[in-house]
Image (cartoon, grey):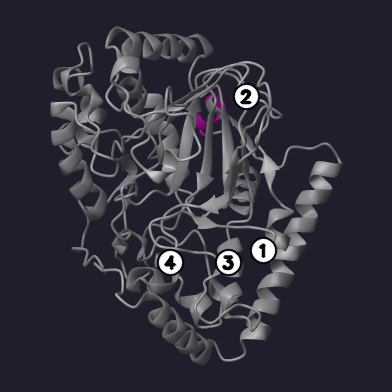
Amino acid sequence: MMNAPLSVFDATLPDNLEGRIVELKRELRARIGDVDDAFARVSDFVAEEVENIEATRARGEEVWPIVDYADLAAGRVDSEQIDYIRRRGCAVIRGHFEHEQAREWDRQLVEYVDTNGFDSQYQGPADDFFGGLDATRPQIFPVFWSRPQMEARQDPRMATVQSFMNQLWKYRSEEGRDWFDPHQDSLYPDRVRRRPPGTNSGGLGAHTDGGAIERWLHPGYQKVFRHIFNGDFDQYDPWDGAWRTDVHEYESSTMCSAFRTFQGWTALSDMQRDQGVLHTVPIPSAMAYVLLRPLLDDVPENSLCGATPRRALPINDTWHPLLTRALSSIPDLSAGDSVWWHCDMIHSVAPVENQQGWGNVMYIPCAPMCDKNAAYATRIAKAFREGNSPDDFPAEHYEANWSNRFTEDELNDIGRQGLCLGGAGNRSGDAIYNSG
């Protein structure tokens, strides 16, 4: 598949973590040179983007790029729209699936958990991700192998959108190394969220996924962010896939063993923007601000501005007030729309009181095929056959003995290829757009 074997950087968490942080910060300051100047250049860029975002909101315009699925599938997304998606790092795909199809999937998911007695089996949160939720009935359901989830993952419309989104990245190096195949996704399994009307929720604070302290300490990430750590912000491209497929997160109860170009979810209900929905800081290069911030003199030497092992990377007003100003809501959504945001993107979920209407989604990202993702797909194919929880999630295995879960003989070519079980795969996106 790839034209060169990947040498993945495996790394273990340092025993003396605080000591290693102090040492690393000393090394990075020496490499960068004038840290204050480097941070000032990044801050100037980010501030200009923040002001543009604030002005866009003040005019009542959408910050999030919006693309109609029909235009995407027909190759009618023009270069101006492409540039805007790259600038913002996120997009909404209107009509990704038909409205009634999404509503039917939602109905089937309810039937799936109810007929299999999920409420009587649920044992409460199995990891810190669920720490703030009521243990009697989750909002995020640890189910992975329902028919609606698998049908959506292997649907040609999903493959078309994933191919389009993957091609926003630079996936081929100048020397000829292919970092990933943008036209073939792995079927990365994730959960579903069902948040009922009347919900009171404190939301989820601004953060990034994909590792916290790893972004400074991990040798793979040091290569990904080499330009930032060399003080060459002008050379940094958040859309360059180089070395990203070589990164592994430190072991945790909930992590991501795959490379995702975009995190994403598909709406199963209509949602209004003021009802506790997703927000992002739509500046893909903002990671440079986050990475340089701990190197300033006002941060304790053993601190990375709140980053800790086995947690999401927090973004807050204490250390990142410029970034939090840019947090921007998704637009109103209809069932069947999908939402996508760059894997480095800062995001949050707004609080809500007495939520109006349901807030139901299926989490489906873009995880293009590469050696790293193929290795994970091979592992989770076994979990799929057995109805077990995938490796990246707590070993709850609720579905192991459930009836009517999706089976191997229902996989189409896209599904089989996405689980590395053979099949022709999907190349429907080849002619849509090519940034490689």
The residue pinned by badge 1 equals 320
Q: CA distance from mark 2 to mark 1?
A: 29 Å
Q: Which residue is mark 2?
A: 333
Query: In the rendered view, does 88 fall on the left or right side of 370?
Result: right
Label 3, residues with CA under 10 Å away: few <14, some 14-19, many ≥20 = many
* Residue 58: quarter of image: top right
Q: Pointer 4: what residue?
A: 213
Q: Which residue is mark 3?
A: 290
Cα separation between marks 3 and 2 = 30 Å
- The residues bearing labels 2 and 4 have C-alpha atoms spaced at a distance of 34 Å
| Residue 284: % across, % down | 58, 57
Magenta span covers which residues? 70-75
SS label for mark 1: loop
SS at mark 4 in the image:
loop
Q: Earlier in the sequence, mark 1 or mark 4?
A: 4
Q: Is residue 103 above or below residue 370?
A: above
Q: Earlier in the sequence, mark 2 or mark 1?
A: 1
Q: Residue at x 62, y 22 (%)?
A: 271
Left or right: where 120 falls relative to 377: right
Q: Earlier in the sequence, mark 3 or mark 2?
A: 3
Counting from the top left corner in percent of width and height, residue 51 is at 80, 57
